[in-house]
Image (cartoon, helix red, strand yellow):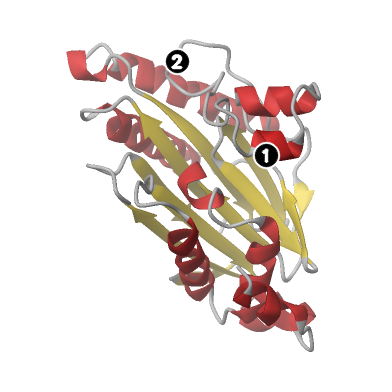
């Protein structure tokens, strides 16, 4: 766990975890870069196998962090440009070795402008970003998956979606050669003291729903403890074939700011007991 004091006066606390699960190797990657000008937090979930997926996810992380460190901007044009650069870097890497030719990765990235107290984000695939504000959890990203298209078109109900074979079929990711969807915001949004962000791969969010994200947040004394509490639920719920899973938590403000709105709330403990 780490923290820094932003130029706006807000404390930014963050923590990360990335686990191999039951797989032979970990194809997820996480990273961050912080300064008094701004910050960049990223989670990527690679695919390709045999050394490909991990190279793709690491390439995406390095491309985003290097680009942002050279110019810590959060306007839509610049953020979209970073996404394009990451795709180009992965597609170039595919030409370097036979085992890399099918590598690809999802990505979710959160950007902060510390001076103005603003946030921006982008993503591709089914790695997600959640924002919890005043005990309300909102999924900021929408999966680029076949399942999500079915839900949008009302082809499947939410109940049917839980067991759908389309659950993990993606139609967009870095390195696939398919269309890149630029989902960044036209205008960054204002941060508030007490905001909590969660960036996570599907191996993580499939095991912990939004109610439990909120519940564990209210009981956590740090960003790191929040991740640990959620990880315990992920491991209890998921099968022996647990996928790689990664998560990155970002708190705007210290523990008191994050948990202030949870004081006196009682339903959380019961929710966790029934998880």
Q: Nearer the viewer, residue 87 or 106?
A: 106
Toward which corner of the image does residue 182 lie, by quadrant?
A: top right
Q: Position of residue 256 (x, y in %)?
A: 67, 84
Which quarter shows the C terminus?
Answer: bottom right
Kindly identify the residue that appears in the image at 37 percent across and 46 percent down.
Answer: 244
Sequence-first tag of 1 and 2: 1
10 Å crowding of disc 2: few (<14), some (14-19), many (20+): some
Which quarter shows the N terminus?
Answer: bottom left
Q: Position of residue 98 (x, y in %)?
A: 19, 13
Q: Position of residue 18 (x, y in %)?
A: 37, 54
On the question of residue 7 being in view, the answer is no
On the question of residue 193 being in view, the answer is yes
Residue 32 placement, left or right of 78: left
Query: Which label belongs to residue 7?
Result: none
Kindly identify the residue that appears in the image at 78 percent across and 83 percent down.
Answer: 265
Q: Which residue is mark 2?
A: 176
10 Å crowding of disc 1: few (<14), some (14-19), many (20+): many
Q: Nearer the viewer, residue 20 or 176?
A: 20
Q: Which residue is mark 1?
A: 141
Q: Nearer the viewer, residue 46 or 63?
A: 46
Q: Are marks 1 and 2 in contact (CB under 8 Å)?
A: no
Q: Nearer the viewer, residue 272 or 25?
A: 272
* Above-or-below relation of 169 to 184: above
Give the structural element (helix, strand or loop) at label 2: loop
Residue 138 placement, left or right of 53: right
Give the structural element (helix, strand or loop) at label 1: loop
Kindly identify the residue that appears in the image at 46 percent across and 68 percent down.
Answer: 232
* Above-or-below relation of 216 to 181: below
Q: Position of residue 138 (x, y in %)?
A: 75, 52
In space, the residues marked 1 and 2 are separated at their CA atoms by 20 Å
């Amino acid at each position: 766990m780490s923290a820094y004091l932003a130029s706006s006066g807000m404390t930014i606390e963050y923590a990360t975890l990335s686990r191999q699960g039951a797989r032979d190797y970990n194809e997820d990657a996480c990273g961050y870069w912080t300064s008094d000008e701004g910050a960049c937090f990223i989670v990527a979930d690679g695919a390709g196998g045999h050394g490909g997926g991990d190279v793709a996810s690491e390439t995406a992380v390095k491309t985003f962090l290097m680009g942002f460190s050279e110019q810590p901007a959060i306007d839509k044009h610049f953020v979209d440009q970073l996404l394009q650069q990451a795709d180009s870097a992965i597609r170039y890497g595919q030409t370097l070795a036979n085992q890399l030719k099918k590598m690809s990765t999802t990505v979710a990235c959160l950007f902060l402008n510390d001076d103005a107290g603003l946030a921006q984000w982008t993503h591709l695939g089914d790695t997600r970003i959640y924002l919890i504000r005043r005990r309300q959890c909102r999924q900021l990203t929408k999966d680029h998956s076949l399942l999500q298209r079915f839900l949008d078109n009302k082809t499947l109900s939410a109940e049917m979606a839980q067991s759908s074979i389309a659950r993990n079929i993606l139609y967009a990711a870095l390195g696939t050669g398919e269309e890149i969807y630029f989902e960044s915001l036209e205008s960054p949004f204002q941060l508030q003291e007490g905001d909590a962000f969660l960036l996570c791969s599907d191996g993580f969010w499939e095991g912990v729903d939004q109610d439990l994200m909120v519940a564990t947040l209210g009981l956590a004394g740090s960003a790191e403890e929040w991740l640990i509490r959620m990880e315990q639920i992920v491991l209890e719920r998921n099968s022996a074939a647990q996928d790689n899973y990664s998560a990155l938590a970002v708190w705007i403000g210290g523990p008191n700011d994050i948990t202030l709105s949870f004081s006196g709330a009682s339903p959380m403990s019961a929710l966790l007991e029934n998880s």
